[in-house]
Image: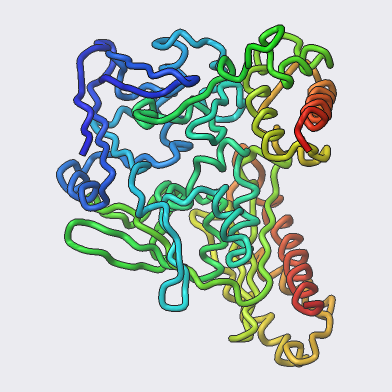
């Protein structure tokens, strides 16, 4: 373990300690010994807080040297993706297995941000606007949390409890997320003022699951947490049954697309803020719902 | 705190770095490398772009301690010392008028250098995508795109087939 000692060299600043290790076990021990240590991975959230003097943690726990966190691979028919896998690597290495998450990853920041930022960081920050979160919700992903006492797995919808709040305990670190590889087409769409470097005004992730004849949708940046659109999902499943669409692969009737959009709008609980109004977000989500469902279904029909 | 790292191919050791400092601060204030610019300090502008172990990153978003033992290349390390000392990308920015006030230029040089080493013949949308994290308030970007196209053509022409 390489632990860099705190010095008093810069007197005008608060004393801070940087905890570093390349061992996962030691990282968990350090977190147990320093429950107030703030973990840092890509730093794209935490460094802004530090640079702007918004927080002065007593200790920072650097997770970028731990090889286990940057691994991914199959596990019991699902994928286990280490919390430290960057967005750039998700796009390059997992785009075929997790297309919805990869599309979302492409909308994150810029190349510089994607080279550092991680889904683990998105989970840790638990911002309602985290672009990586709606695709996890739409795939019923689980978050793996670890401490010296062991590991536990929790559904992502339970993990995120409110805006920038989650149920990570003081002695725990986010180890990985577990997610089913795509069973059919997946989509993600995001509204922003430009095509890069924007925090979502609102976003929508949509997955088609032919094996269980279902469609999953989750809105982002339109409520205190990402929100699954259960009523919209039940409605469209009924339409597919009624019209025998899974078998015929016929186009979705326009009226059903409109109703699906309305139900997604209704699931959202947005607020007015600097990025947009609640009214606009409701409207935009209805549009995104119709579009993403059409794109995904067209991809399935033509496959 | 004491840090050792490789910067532009040289082994560097620094004492007295504050634990909360960014890599950008380390480069500019401790290592006398002011090429990387400090503008937004939140990853929005790309003016502080450097290579960290071969990946382009915003150095303002890297904790200096995270660079311990790592390999950093700044805009100062991109100049290759041939002729006028500039890299082809830098020369193309000068010739195409991609530099006005110059503050964003180091970051754009690093981002363009990274694009062209991965993709010597980028399309315009690929250039825009690669430079999406670098803001310029002077040029309107057209001359920057022209500079990247020019550098790409020259590098491709010079590359062994």
Q: Nearer the viewer, residue A46 or B149?
A: B149
Residue A104 locus on image (x, y percent): 62, 54
Residue extending furthest front? B161
Q: Quadrant of residue B111?
A: top right
Query: Which residue is painted at 25% across and 39% down in the image?
Result: A37
Along the horizontal axis of the image, is B21 left or right of A135?
A: left
Along the horizontal axis of the image, is B134 left or right of A177?
A: right
Along the horizontal axis of the image, is A112 left or right of A5?
A: right
Q: Nearer the viewer, residue A109 or A203?
A: A109
In the depicted structure, whether residue A137 falls above or below residue B124: below
Residue A290 locus on image (x, y percent): 76, 67
Q: How many badges with numbers are in the image?
A: 0
Query: Which residue is painted at 61% across and 40% down in the image?
Result: A109
In the depicted structure, whether residue B148 falls above or below residue A238: above
Task: Say if residue B39 shows up in the picture.
Answer: yes
Task: Say if residue B141 shows up in the picture.
Answer: no
Quarter of the picture containing the N terminus of chain A is top left
In the depicted structure, whether residue A127 falls above or below residue B86: below
In the depicted structure, whether residue B86 falls above or below residue A15: above
Q: Nearer the viewer, residue A65 or A168?
A: A65
Query: Which residue is painted at 57% across and 14% down in the image?
Result: B76
Q: Quadrant of residue A267?
A: bottom right
Q: Quadrant of residue A43?
A: top left
Residue A142 locus on image (x, y percent): 42, 67
Quarter of the picture containing the C terminus of chain A is bottom right
Along the horizontal axis of the image, is A19 left or right of A243?
A: left
Colouring method of the image = rainbow
Query: Which residue is painted at 55% across and 51% down in the image?
Result: A89
């Amino acid at each position: 373990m390489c632990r860099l000692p705190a010095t008093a060299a810069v007197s005008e600043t608060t004393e801070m300690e940087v905890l570093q290790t390349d061992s996962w076990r030691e990282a968990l021990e350090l977190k147990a010994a320093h429950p107030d240590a703030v973990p840092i991975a890509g730093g794209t959230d935490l460094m802004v807080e530090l640079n702007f003097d918004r927080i002065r943690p007593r200790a920072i726990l650097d997770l970028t040297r731990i090889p286990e966190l940057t691994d991914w691979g199959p596990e019991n028919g699902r994928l286990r993706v280490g919390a430290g896998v960057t967005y750039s690597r998700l796009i390059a290495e997992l785009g075929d297995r997790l297309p919805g998450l990869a599309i979302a990853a492409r909308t994150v920041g810029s190349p510089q941000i994607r080279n550092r930022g991680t889904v683990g960081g998105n989970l840790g920050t638990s911002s309602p606007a985290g672009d990586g979160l709606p695709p996890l919700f739409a795939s019923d992903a689980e978050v793996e949390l670890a401490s010296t006492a062991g590991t536990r797995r929790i559904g992502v919808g339970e993990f995120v409890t409110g805006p920038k709040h989650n149920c990570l305990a003081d002695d725990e670190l986010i180890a990985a997320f577990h997610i089913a590889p795509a069973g059919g087409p997946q989509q993600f769409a995001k509204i922003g003022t430009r095509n890069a470097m924007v925090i979502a005004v609102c976003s929508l992730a949509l997955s088609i699951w032919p094996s269980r004849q279902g469609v999953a949708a989750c809105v982002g940046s339109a409520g205190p947490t990402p929100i699954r659109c259960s009523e919209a999902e039940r409605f469209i499943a009924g339409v597919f049954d009624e019209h025998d669409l899974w078998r015929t692969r016929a186009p979705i009737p326009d009226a059903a697309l409109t109703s699906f959009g309305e139900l997604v709008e209704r699931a959202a609980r947005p607020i007015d803020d600097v990025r947009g109004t609640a009214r606009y977000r409701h409207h935009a989500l209805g549009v995104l719902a119709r579009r993403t469902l059409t794109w995904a279904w067209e991809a399935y029909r033509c496959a | 705190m004491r840090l050792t790292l490789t910067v532009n191919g040289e082994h560097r050791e620094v004492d007295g770095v504050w634990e909360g400092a960014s890599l950008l601060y380390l480069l500019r204030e401790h290592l006398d490398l002011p090429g990387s610019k400090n503008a937004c300090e939140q990853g929005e502008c790309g003016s502080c772009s450097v290579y960290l172990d071969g990946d382009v990153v915003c150095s303002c978003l890297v904790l200096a301690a995270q660079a311990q033992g790592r390999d950093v290349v700044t805009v100062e390390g991109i100049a290759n010392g041939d002729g006028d000392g500039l890299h082809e990308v830098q020369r193309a920015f000068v010739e195409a008028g991609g530099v006005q006030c110059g503050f964003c230029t180091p970051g754009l040089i690093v981002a363009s250098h990274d694009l062209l080493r991965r993709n010597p013949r980028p399309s315009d949308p690929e250039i825009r995508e690669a430079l999406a994290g670098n803001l310029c308030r002077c040029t309107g970007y057209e001359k920057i795109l022209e500079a990247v196209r020019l550098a790409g053509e020259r590098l491709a022409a010079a590359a062994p087939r």
